[in-house]
Image (cartoon, rainbow, N blue to C red):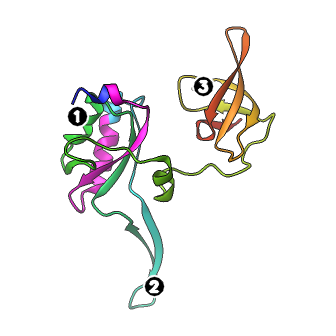
Amino acid sequence: MSDFNELNVGPRWYVVHTYTGYENKVKATIEKAVEYRNLQDLIFDVKIPVITSTTTDAKGKEKIVEEKIFPAYVFVKMVMNDETWHVVRNISGVTGFVGPGSRPVPLTDEEALAIAVEEKVELNAFNIGDEVEIIDGFLSGHSGKISEISEDSQEVTVIVSSIGREMPVSLDAKAIKKK
């Protein structure tokens, strides 16, 4: 599996196939493994997309029901390398990653948005001049001011002060939050 490190393109969404009914257990186990093994910088998020609906039982009582959109699948946003592959693949209830053979294939950004595992940043959520904090990436924890916003509002340029000088940094709009 060592060729994962050569193909690594940063954090991406991967689809993990599980036994039916084990989705929540697998999600909880991955989250525990991240905590115990200190993998927060490699495994970022674990989701099970659901649809919430309201049903009425025979007695007329309303009940909120969550239905899994993709039964037997868990979505993991992670940096794919030997260690993360091994951690996720060897969790009880996981049958493997989605992809040809044993090679996991990440979702494209469009696929992640379409199946609602990646939230689209609200258009016009930010304005030029807004004070923001960087919450993802190597500058996480730094602050700055927005100097540019892409036409689709998905990329921003933030002026960050570091080591006594200001530098522009291009970021995904998902990597910042308003102060």
Seen from the viewer's position, the closer of residues 28 and 50 is 50
| Disc 2 crowd, CA 10 A, few/some/many (<14, 14-19, 20+) | few
Amino acid identity at mark 3: Gly
At x 74% / y 43%, what residue is drawn?
Answer: 126
Residue 148 in view (yes/no): yes
Dot 1: within a 10 Å radius of its alpha carbon, few (fewer than 14), some, or many (20 or more) residues? few
Element carrying mark 2: loop
Q: Report the quarter where the N terminus lies.
A: top left
Q: Residues within 10 Å of mark 3 (few under 14, many from 20)?
A: few
SS for callout 3? loop
Whole-percent x, y for residue 107 in the image: 41, 48
Whole-percent x, y for residue 40 in the image? 41, 31
Name which residue type carries label 2: Lys
Q: Residue furthest right?
A: 129
Can you give x and y, in whole percent of width and height, for residue 35 in the image?
35, 33
What separation in Å lies between label 2 and label 3 (alpha carbons)? 47 Å
Confirm whether the magenta stretch covers residue 22.
yes
In the rendered structure, the answer to whether residue 54 lies left or right of residue 69 reads: right
Image position of 83 (left or right of 78): left
Give the residue number, with chain letter if any, for mark 1. 86
In the rendered image, the vertical position of residue 65 relative to residue 147, given as above or below? below
**Is residue 104 highlighted in magenta?**
no
Q: Which residue is mark 2?
A: 61
Mark 2 to mark 1 CA distance (whole Å): 46 Å
Q: CA distance from mark 3 to mark 1?
A: 30 Å
Q: Which residues are magenta?
A: 6-33
Residue to which mark 3 is pinned: 141
Question: Number of marks in the image?
Answer: 3
Kind of residue indicated by mark 1: His
Q: Is residue 97 above or below residue 62?
A: above
